[in-house]
């Protein structure tokens, strides 16, 4: 059980305090309820570019990083399709420095032209490093466009294309900030060697006078139910053929999410998982194969991806994958196999919760999702999943009309 | 209303008193030394078996790494599938890694399951069979993986710079090829296994919420291994003559992988800890000179880092970045400019205090939790250092002067000493 206390400032900022006196450190985690899904389709990559600009100085503090480093702190941030998260770890004695820095950038950024110009370049290099120069690096751009026709999961967090980032203007940046980066759309978690009374005082002092902002009402286009299978063939300068298959799945708040999470672990979650044992070890069709899912808030995708052994025909490899999925659809998995993936989940949660930083991050995530307390009810939700659920969900998900397939073929 | 222009008062991290929580030490019946740190709130533990079975000891390339990999792929009693199923059923993670001097087996598990897991680890150490079938799958899949990796400029650059620094034949510089994967024979692996695992020298590290009888438990399973001494080898270095290299790996590539590196002595050299501070200032953290200039000012790259390589016998000082193809040469020019600046201008007190505070805060944060504490101890023990090394490093961070840093820059940051490689 992770203990915490929650209160809300008059401007709507939710504050969660989690005390752990065994560490000399404190963590501040601020999550904003905005991600790549909230972007204009013609200006994608914005939420992530924005994350970079958050380090370019705020209205009263020219440099964000230096004072934090001076206080012995470290920080980082990440953006997903669903949310944006900023976190700081520093010696607990210097916690107020984190309040000072984070509240000032929630108040307002400096919006410097130079910072925008530099970070546009940095993000373009990030785009190249991760998605253009790596073999198979463009596959998720292509897959998202294939699997989603309406929902903004159509594009990746980094953006649809370089030009969207290159063309970002300062007015867009300001508008985005004042729409999304307001107290009412954020969750502040403070964890570690701290007391609730002290955090109440500090939160009121530093964040209390920031204008509330308007609550963001998300209304995203819903993805229509897929009615026919979709296929795409890519020929590229890669050394091996690769197979990518995706199926639509329910969102994070659906009970079926937990069934699917365990189901993907049965298929691929280690050396004794089904796809690995059958297709890599026994049939030797793939040199590696994985099954996972997006873990996204809105309806996501279940993914099977693998690289083929040289000489294997992709049609044969795909049939073998289908045969394994047919087993999931036709036969109950054994109780022991289900117990195995439940045990793995229990252990994974225990290891994750070792770090104060992870605990703070999880509290913020569940609060954005609906309620921080949900963090403590995850294991019981997994515990209720039955072998019959796995069978039903396999039948519901692994249908050809629900599938999107990419054959990524080597042209050398 | 708070005064937002005014930074809150801070306690300088240099004033913190940092302590490395001591380990408990016990010796098994066969002389195997076990280092234990009992701490943490979660019911989890880490056990690590360190064998002197690294690639320094192999006669033929890839034998050490392959033996280590195949430890989990079959014993006289169990197939690879059954072994994996056993550990996975208990939600445990069993990993193995091969380094230069050592090779390890690492087990992360819930403490309540340790009794079910140790007997199977014992089996891996004493009854592995290295099945031919498993070797064949490994060879095929590793060759395929290598083919994909060789398309990546960062992978190619990483291999080549090590080969330049240490020599292609040296354990720190050698790299894999499809032919060498093909050349592997099961007998070689069995011999290596027999000599360096079954009969080999072992040191153990355990951390987390430990069972009360941890010493008896480990002795019961691992106290009867032969634990024979292993003589560490010290192969000679053969650094490359040519210092500046440009390679085109993919003519259509949009980025270049830049590696700039010079040889550097190991942790026993009196300059090592001092240079860690100079390195932080130069390129060791987000606020470093290289990052501020080349990423934050010029936007040439998503990130640039410098570091001392983590080797036991010899080290190297490395600068590493991926930059736009058309700005690679400009980025390199800036790296040398930053070296020059450090050689000529002593760092001002404020920037130096920032580096000190950052480093201290970083160590304080890093000592959080039993796994991090045991990792520090492991580093000290395997490098043949003592507890004093930890306190010396703290002391160096607190007291090194701007003038000392400048003279170290003059000694080590000389462009002509550096290898310089760009792979596009």
Image: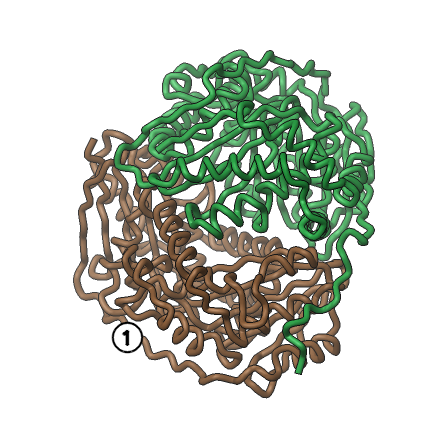
Instruction: Report whether A263 appears left or right of B252.
Output: right
Instruction: Report whether A259 appears left or right of B106.
Output: left
Give me the residue at 66% from left, 73% from top.
A17
Residue B333 vertical position relative to residue B7 in the rendered view, above or below: above
**Corner quadrant of residue B252:** top left
Q: Is residue B25 visible?
A: yes
Q: Secondary structure at mark 1?
A: loop
Judging from the image, mark 1 belongs to the subunit labelled A
Residue A349: x %, y % from top left: 58, 58
Name chain A's colour: brown
Q: Which part of the image, by quadrant, shows the C terminus of chain B?
A: top left
Residue A80: x %, y % from top left: 42, 62
Give me the residue at 50% from left, 27% from top.
B70
Residue situated in front as seen by the camera: A206 or A412: A206
Residue A339: x %, y % from top left: 52, 54
Q: Which part of the image, by quadrant, shows the N terminus of chain B?
A: bottom right
Query: How many badges with numbers are in the image?
Result: 1
Residue situated in front as seen by the camera: B339 or B229: B339
Instruction: Report whether A302 appears left or right of A148.
Output: right
**Corner quadrant of residue B57:** top right
**Corner quadrant of residue B6:** bottom right
Please, which residue is most extreme toward the front here? B344
Residue situated in front as seen by the camera: A346 or B14: B14
Give me the residue at 68% from left, 31% from top.
B408
Among the chains pictured, the one given green colouring is B
Residue bearing mark 1? A221
């Amino acid at each position: 059980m992770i203990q915490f206390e929650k209160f809300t400032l008059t401007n709507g900022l939710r504050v969660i305090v989690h005390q752990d006196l065994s560490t000399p450190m404190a963590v501040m985690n601020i999550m904003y309820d905005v991600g790549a899904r909230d972007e204009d389709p013609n200006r994608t990559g914005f939420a992530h570019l924005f994350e970079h600009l958050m380090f370019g100085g705020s209205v009263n503090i020219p440099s964000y990083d230096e004072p934090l480093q001076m206080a012995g702190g470290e920080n980082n941030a990440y953006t997903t399709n669903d949310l944006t998260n900023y976190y700081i770890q520093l010696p607990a004695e210097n916690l107020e420095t984190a309040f000072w820095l984070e509240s000032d950038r929630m108040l307002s950024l400096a919006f410097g032209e130079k910072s925008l110009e530099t970070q546009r370049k940095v993000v373009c290099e990030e785009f190249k490093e991760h998605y253009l120069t790596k073999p198979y690096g463009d596959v998720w751009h292509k897959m998202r466009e294939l699997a989603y026709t309406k929902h903004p999961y159509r594009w990746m967090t980094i953006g649809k294309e370089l030009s969207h980032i290159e063309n970002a203007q300062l007015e867009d940046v300001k508008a985005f900030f004042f729409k999304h980066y307001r107290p009412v759309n954020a969750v502040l978690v403070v964890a570690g060697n701290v007391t609730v009374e002290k955090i109440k005082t500090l939160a009121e002092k530093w964040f209390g006078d920031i204008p509330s902002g308007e609550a963001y009402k998300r209304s995203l286009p819903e993805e229509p139910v897929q009615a026919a299978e979709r296929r795409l063939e890519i020929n590229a300068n890669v050394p091996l053929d690769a197979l990518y298959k995706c199926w639509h799945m329910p969102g994070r708040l659906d009970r079926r999410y937990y069934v699917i999470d365990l189901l993907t672990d049965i298929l691929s979650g280690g050396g004794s998982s089904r796809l690995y044992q059958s297709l890599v070890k026994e049939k030797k069709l793939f040199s590696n194969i994985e099954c996972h899912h997006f873990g996204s808030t809105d309806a996501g995708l279940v993914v099977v991806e693998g690289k083929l052994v040289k000489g294997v025909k992709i049609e044969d490899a795909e049939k073998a994958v289908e045969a394994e999925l047919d087993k999931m659809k036709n036969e109950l998995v054994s109780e022991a196999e289900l117990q195995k993936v439940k045990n793995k989940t229990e252990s994974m949660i225990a290891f994750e919760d070792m770090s104060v930083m992870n605990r703070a991050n999880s509290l913020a995530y569940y609060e954005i999702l609906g309620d921080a307390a949900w963090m403590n009810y995850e294991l019981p939700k997994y515990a209720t999943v039955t072998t019959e659920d796995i069978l039903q969900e396999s039948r519901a998900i692994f249908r050809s009309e629900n599938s999107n397939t990419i054959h990524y073929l080597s042209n050398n | 209303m708070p005064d937002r222009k005014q930074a809150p008062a801070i306690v300088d991290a240099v004033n913190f008193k940092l302590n490395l929580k001591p380990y408990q030490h016990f010796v098994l019946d066969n002389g195997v030394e076990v280092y234990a740190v009992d701490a943490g709130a979660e019911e989890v533990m880490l056990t690590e078996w360190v064998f002197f079975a690294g690639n320094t000891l192999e006669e033929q390339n890839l034998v050490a790494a392959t033996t280590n990999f195949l430890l989990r792929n079959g014993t006289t009693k169990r197939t690879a599938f059954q072994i994996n199923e056993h550990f996975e059923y208990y939600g445990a993670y069993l990993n193995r890694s091969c380094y230069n001097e050592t090779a390890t087996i690492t087990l992360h598990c819930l403490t309540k399951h340790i009794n079910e897991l140790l007997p199977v680890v014992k089996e891996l150490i004493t009854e592995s069979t290295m099945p031919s079938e498993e070797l064949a799958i490994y060879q095929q899949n590793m060759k395929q993986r290598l083919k994909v990796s060789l398309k990546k400029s960062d992978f190619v650059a990483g291999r080549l710079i090590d080969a330049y620094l240490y020599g292609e034949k040296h354990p720190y510089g050698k790299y894999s090829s499809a032919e060498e994967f093909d050349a592997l024979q099961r007998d070689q692996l069995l011999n290596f296994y027999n000599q360096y695992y079954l009969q080999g020298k072992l040191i153990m590290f355990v951390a987390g919420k430990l069972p009360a009888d941890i010493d008896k438990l480990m002795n019961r399973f691992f106290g009867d291994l032969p634990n024979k001494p292993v003589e560490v080898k010290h192969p000679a270095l053969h650094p490359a003559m040519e210092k500046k290299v440009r390679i085109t790996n993919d003519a259509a590539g949009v980025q270049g992988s830049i590696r700039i590196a010079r040889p550097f002595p190991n942790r026993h050299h009196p300059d090592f800890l001092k240079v860690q501070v100079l390195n932080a200032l130069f390129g060791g953290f987000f606020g470093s000179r290289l990052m501020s200039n080349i990423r934050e000012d010029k936007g040439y790259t998503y990130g640039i880092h410098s570091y001392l390589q983590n080797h036991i016998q010899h080290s190297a000082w490395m600068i590493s970045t991926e930059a736009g193809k058309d700005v690679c040469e400009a980025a390199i020019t800036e790296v040398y400019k930053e070296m020059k600046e450090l050689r000529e201008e002593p760092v001002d007190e404020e920037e130096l205090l920032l580096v000190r505070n950052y480093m201290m805060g970083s160590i304080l944060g890093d000592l959080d939790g039993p796994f991090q504490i045991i990792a520090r101890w492991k580093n000290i023990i395997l490098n043949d250092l003592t507890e004093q090394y930890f306190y010396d490093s703290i002391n160096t961070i607190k007291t090194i002067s701007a003038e000392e840093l400048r003279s170290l820059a003059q000694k080590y940051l000389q462009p002509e000493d550096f290898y310089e490689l760009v792979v596009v």
